[in-house]
Amino acid sequence: MSKGIFIIVEQRNGKVQNVGLELIGEATRLKADLGDDVYAVLLGYNMKDEVEKLYHYGADKVILVDNKYLKDYATEPYTKAVAEVVKKFDPEIMLFGASSIGRDLAPRVASRVKTGLVADTTGLRMAKTEQELSQEAAHGCKTPERALLMTRPAFGGNLLATLMCPRTKPQMATVRPGVMKKIDKDESRKGELIKLDVEFTADDMNIEILEAVKAEKKMVDITEAKVLVSGGRGVGKDGYEMLKACADQLGGEVSSSRACVDDAACEWAKPEMQVGQTGKTVRPDLYLACGISGAIQHVAGMENSDLVISINKNDTAAIFSVSDLGVVGDVKKILPKLTAALKKYNEAKANA
């Protein structure tokens, strides 16, 4: 019988990425319903120093596949390694981050082990209600109480669809970075290390990596920001300096809605700053939405923020329905006044 919740932990340059830790956190919540151990699958080369971190964030066991062919991501060797993990351990559930790596790897693994895959999920839970269990049984699931229900936006983000994969195992999904939440780090937590040897040959490497070059320009990752000041169509093409000034006083970063990214006149709004279904999913402590109407596609990317404050001159704007505090008015007048007040407060605090 299939058993275990397996997380494919992404690493870059020998360092575990946050999306893997987020998924381990989600797996610990699924574990409460499923009762299975959480396995972190770590692929790379000379990765032993990163194993303890996975225990600290909730992994019960770590499967380490350490090989020179896995030092940098390449499709074929990584696919072979993960397929070997599936073959040997027969997992119930397997989760990948919906990063550039995960979106390339997950469908290839699913094809190789002949199972289904739900992409870009935003919610995961086990079937619980009598109706859910009966639906799973009707669709051929022999153990409906172990069925994973996977929710993702559908039809351009206009509704949320819950999907299942009842007939094949593992039940696989990719999950966007920033959607799930890490559990608190506990350095006293220990686990079991399982080393898995996978035989690779030169034929397994379908590409040759000549050199890995890091971009010199530091790119801000808005999924890591604790505070985001986000601009929409209402701030216009000249709104960046206004947003940046406020973000600086709050110790945060600037982000954007799709409306600004798609508007050629808004040269400040870059794709990596976009929040929403077709952008990035964020969960900052504070999300300040400035001139954003609140289309469902945008809301899908920020609704899990701890505190949402919105400024919009339209008192019926949809963004207010997901806001903790809504301010009706012209953002170009209100935001500078807010920034000035924050600056005065920060200066007084510094001089106290």
Image (tube, rainbow, N blue to C red):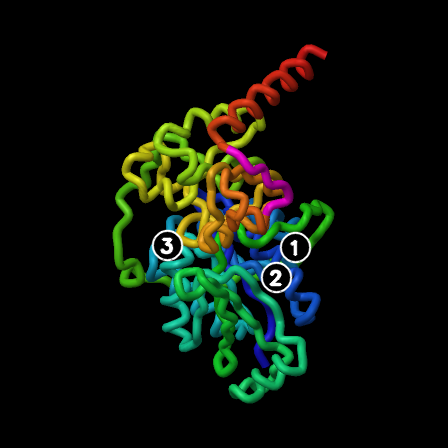
Name above or below for residue 119 compared with residue 336.
below
Name above or below for residue 30 compared with residue 279.
below
Query: Sequence-wise, which precedes: disc 3 or disc 2?
Result: 2
Number of the label disc, if any, that sits on residue 174 = none
User: Which amino acid type is shown beneath numbered disc 2?
Assistant: Ala
| Numbered disc 3: secondary structure | helix
Mark 3 and mark 1: Cα distance apart in space: 28 Å
Q: Residue sitting at 34 percent across and 34 percent down?
A: 215
Q: Is residue 66 visible?
A: no
Residue 247 is situated, as x and y percent measured from the top left of the image, at 52, 28
Mark 3 sits on what residue? 69
Number of the label disc, if any, that sits on residue 27 = 2
Snapshot quadrant of residue 193: bottom right
The residue segment tinted magenta is: 323-329
Residue 275 is situated, as x and y percent measured from the top left of the image, at 45, 46
Q: Residue sitting at 41 percent across and 29 percent down?
A: 240
Residue 11 is situated, as x and y percent measured from the top left of the image, at 47, 49
Mark 1 sits on what residue? 58
Residue 157 is situated, as x and y percent measured from the top left of the image, at 44, 60
Q: Is residue 80 left or right of residue 300?
A: left
* Number of residues whose C-alpha sits closer than 10 Å to that of mark 1, classed few (under 14), some (14–19) or many (20 or more): many
Mark 2 and mark 1: Cα distance apart in space: 8 Å
User: Which amino acid type is shown beneath numbered disc 1?
Assistant: Gly
* Number of residues whose C-alpha sits closer than 10 Å to that of mark 3, classed few (under 14), some (14–19) or many (20 or more): many
Query: Sequence-wise, which precedes: disc 3 or disc 1?
Result: 1
Asked if labels 1 and 2 touch by Cβ distance under 8 angstroms, the answer is yes
Q: Is residue 189 left or right of residue 254?
A: right
